[in-house]
Image (tube, rainbow, N blue to C red):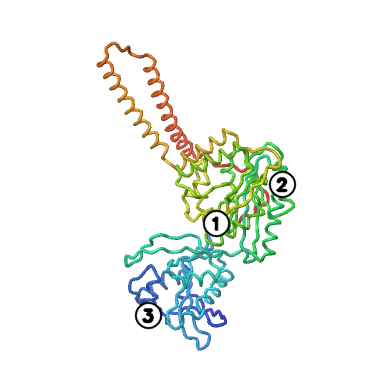
Amino acid sequence: MLTRKRRIEGSQIVLRTMEYEDTDRIVEWRNRERVKKRFIYREPFTVEGHRGWIKTMIDTGKAVQFIICEKEGMRPVGSVYFRDIDGEKKEAEYGIFLGEDDALGKGYGTEAAGLAVEYAFSVMGLKRLILRVFTDNDAAVRSYRRAGFTEERVLKDVECSDGERKDMLLMSLYCSAENKNKLISFVIPCYRSELTLPKVTEEIGETMEALREQGREYDYEIILVNDCSPDDTFSVIRKLCQQDRRVKGVNLARNFGQHAALMAGFHQVKGDVVICLDDDGQTPAAEAGKLLEEIEKGSDVVYAKYEHKKHSLFRNFGSWVNEEMAHIMLGKPKDLYVSSYFAAKRFVVEEIKRYTNAYPYVIGLVLRTTKRISNVTVCHREREIGTSGYTFGKLIGLWFNGFTAFSVKPLRLATALGAVCSVGGFLYGIYTVVKRLVNPNVPMGFSSLMAAVVFMGGMMMVMLGLVGEYVGRMYISMNNSPQYVIRETINDEME
């Protein structure tokens, strides 16, 4: 039993509900070489197979399919459909093909996409559509972009049913609750920032208003995560939330660290793009437009890069160590600069949220999610109030967290050092024996013996400590130690 008949009219085409009588036509279209090579499934299409599709997908509500007809004469020229409809997530996969050769190049595909998308959001109540298209299908990609779909990531080496492997683009389109504007979520971890937060949030509002005046229509929300700051930071957050419903406050029960605070904020966002920045005003919200522009060009993640950093010498040294560690331990490209000011597409954030262990390290999570990461240059401001919350101990903890959570290279380095020390000790033993044989009067040195013992003992303790760090983190993770604990939220309207 097909869904009840519907007719959706456009300027050039009409979408009508598919009927059983369309089976032979669809089978003919799908078996054409031009159409077949645009699908993963390339086996001969049969009448029985299509009827099975109707029975298992259309009749069960897992799919909806329309026939694309020319408005003048109602000649069928193709089909558009939604499959794998998820009622809970309110999303589905979108697909379209034009079966008639003379229907190509007339704009039917773009118009059909617009009509179908409007139907999906307004009638079916969906909130997200996804599609997959081969990267070499330029005409289709351009058509999907005109319909509003944006690229999320590349699916490498997808195997087709005939054995061919090709790259595909995963594209998506979200429906906002009240309008089509893209929603930008700003996530700000807060610690000792009662004096700087009002200015930071005000600058975000001014920046987004300026972008709207430039014709870049964005909505925005701000998530302020108080990492158990000892001052009145949360009182300021509460006041900001009362003044503007777009500001959301999250109060953590104790101090969990910047990266845990980011994870807490990620679980609150609703935006299509997430921008993370600092609470001290040194990362300029006024230049968020540069990050968004790079995202719109196709990057999945964009990090701000500074020509001249205004941090102290200690902080700059810490940043340099962090950069080198990420390059050596995590495989970060040498020319990529990572910072606390970055923008990421929603799918990247959703993947990051899947990490539930007690030691989150956002840079490592980003690097393992996507390779489409770029930099844009922005200015870096002097700190006007207070001092950095990063002490030497906290930086050491951050570095340990990074390389023990996402790399086994330290363990391999420990093995290599152990091997080098063993070989060195063996060679030194041979040298001592030979020296004694050559000159029996050479006294056996107590100092050299103690030096060797202390050196080998120290190396063993370092290696054991490193192994213990890994084992301890495994133990804590196995005991489900939380990344963060939320004491209170303000303006939380998550659906």
Quadrant of the frame with the C terminus = bottom right
* Left/right of residue 265 with respect to residue 81 in the rendered view: right
Give SS at disc 3: helix
Q: Amino acid at mark 3?
A: Glu
Residue denoted by label 1: 346
Residue 115 x/y as whole percent:
55, 75
| Residue found farthest to the bottom | 73
Vertical side of 312 occupied by 13: above or below? below
Is 87 above or below relative to 52?
above
**Residue 459 sits above or below residue 381 on the image:** above
Q: Position of residue 457 (x, y in %)?
A: 40, 23
The kind of residue tagged 2 is: Arg
The type of residue carrying mark 1 is Arg
Which sits earlier in the primary sequence, circle 3 or circle 2? 3
Answer few, some or many: residues within 10 Å of disc 2's Cα (few below 14, many 20 plus, some between 14 and 19): some
Residue pushed farthest left? 437
Classify 422 as above or below 266.
above
Residue at image point 47% right, 63% down: 170
Which of disc 1 and disc 2 is earlier in sequence? Answer: 2
Of residues 272 and 420, the one nearer the viewer is: 420
Label 2 secondary element: helix
Of the numbered discs 3 and 1, the one sitting upstream in the chain is 3
Q: Nearer the viewer, residue 51 or 286?
A: 286
Mark toward the viewer: 3 or 1: 1
- The residue at which mark 2 appears reads as 238
Tell me: 432 left or right of 460: left
Instruction: Specify the label residue 28 is tagged with.
Output: 3
Q: CA distance from mark 3 to mark 2?
A: 63 Å
How far across and down, in percent of the image, does residue 447 sit? Answer: 39, 15
Q: Return the x and y of residue 300 as percentages of the image width and height.
A: 52, 57
CA separation in Å, label 3 and label 1: 39 Å
